[in-house]
């Protein structure tokens, strides 16, 4: 089925003149034709397509990621589909870069004995290595997304939260010692630092390194 109407933004996104756009078919812009078939099935089953990510192709053969929504309408007295497409290539590239960096960080931190973790501004763990998770008898997957209240006693969780707030409020790092009663009991030395947004510089959380100092304390 041919395109019946399109605006200049869509034409520019696809690298076409507006008149040329109206001579083309939607299938022309799908890198993988099966993606269109899947979208048509969703449209047929549900009457709409919501926020589907698809790999598309400009007239220059350059590929880009599009976020597609669609619904059925009546246009000029016949059944038609109105579709909106947003170019999300930059977002997808950022996601891939973030995943690559996360994988690299995980690879590096899994090979050391120190506990390493990161929390967002709400106190939820966004990263934790196996050493840190194992010290409280958890896996990293069981910790990610949780805050200290789900992992420690109320008093301990409140103490840690207060430390994190101080670091985020002042923008200054803190180093302190303590004794862990949850998980594997041990003395520890913690160094915590404010975590900054790469673009704005705003403080968005806390990153920490914790070392087991039980042997030193018992010496």
Image (cartoon, rainbow, N blue to C red):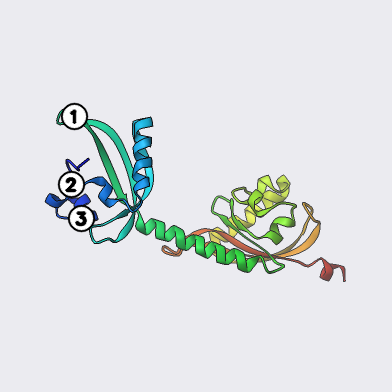
| Residue placed under numbered mark 1 in the picture | 78
Of 128 and 8, nearer the camera is: 8
Disc 2 and disc 3 in contact, CB within 8 angstroms? no
Residues at discs 2 and 1 in contact (Cβ within 8 Å): no
Residue at screen point 16% across, 28% down: 77
Q: Residue at x 71, y 61 (%)?
A: 131
> Foreground mark, 2 or 1?
1
Which secondary structure, mark 3? helix
Which residue appears at 21% of the width and 57% of the height? 15
- Decide: is 130 above or below 9: below
Q: How far apart are marks 1 and 3 (CA)?
A: 27 Å
- Asked whether the residues under the numbered discs 1 and 3 touch, taking CB atoms below 8 Å apart as contact, a structural biologist would say no
Image spot of residue 173 (x, y percent) = 60, 66
| Quadrant in the rendering for residue 118 | bottom right
Give the structural element (helix, strand or loop) at label 1: strand
Q: Residue 7 carries which label?
A: 2
Quarter of the C terminus within the rendering: bottom right
């Amino acid at each position: 089925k041919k395109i019946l109407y399109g605006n200049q933004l869509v034409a520019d996104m696809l690298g076409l003149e507006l008149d040329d756009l109206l001579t083309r078919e939607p299938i022309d812009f799908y890198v993988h034709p099966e993606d269109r078939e899947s979208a048509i099935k969703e449209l047929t089953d549900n009457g709409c397509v919501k926020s589907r990510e698809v790999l598309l192709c400009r007239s220059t053969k350059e590929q880009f990621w599009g976020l597609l929504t669609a619904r059925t309408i009546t246009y000029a007295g016949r059944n038609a589909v109105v579709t909106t497409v947003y170019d999300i290539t930059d977002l997808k590239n950022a996601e891939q870069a973030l995943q690559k960096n996360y994988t690299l960080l995980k690879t590096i931190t899994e090979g050391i004995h120190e506990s390493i973790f990161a929390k967002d501004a709400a106190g939820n763990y966004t990263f934790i290595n196996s050493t840190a998770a194992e010290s409280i008898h958890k896996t990293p997957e069981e910790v990610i997304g949780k805050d200290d209240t789900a992992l420690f006693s109320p008093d301990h969780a409140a103490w840690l939260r207060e430390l994190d707030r101080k670091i985020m409020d002042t923008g200054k790092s803190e180093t302190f010692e303590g004794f862990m009663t949850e998980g594997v009991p041990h003395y520890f030395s913690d160094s915590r630092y404010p975590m900054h947004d790469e673009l704005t510089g705003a403080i968005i959380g806390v990153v920490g390194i914790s070392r087991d100092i039980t042997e030193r304390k018992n010496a």
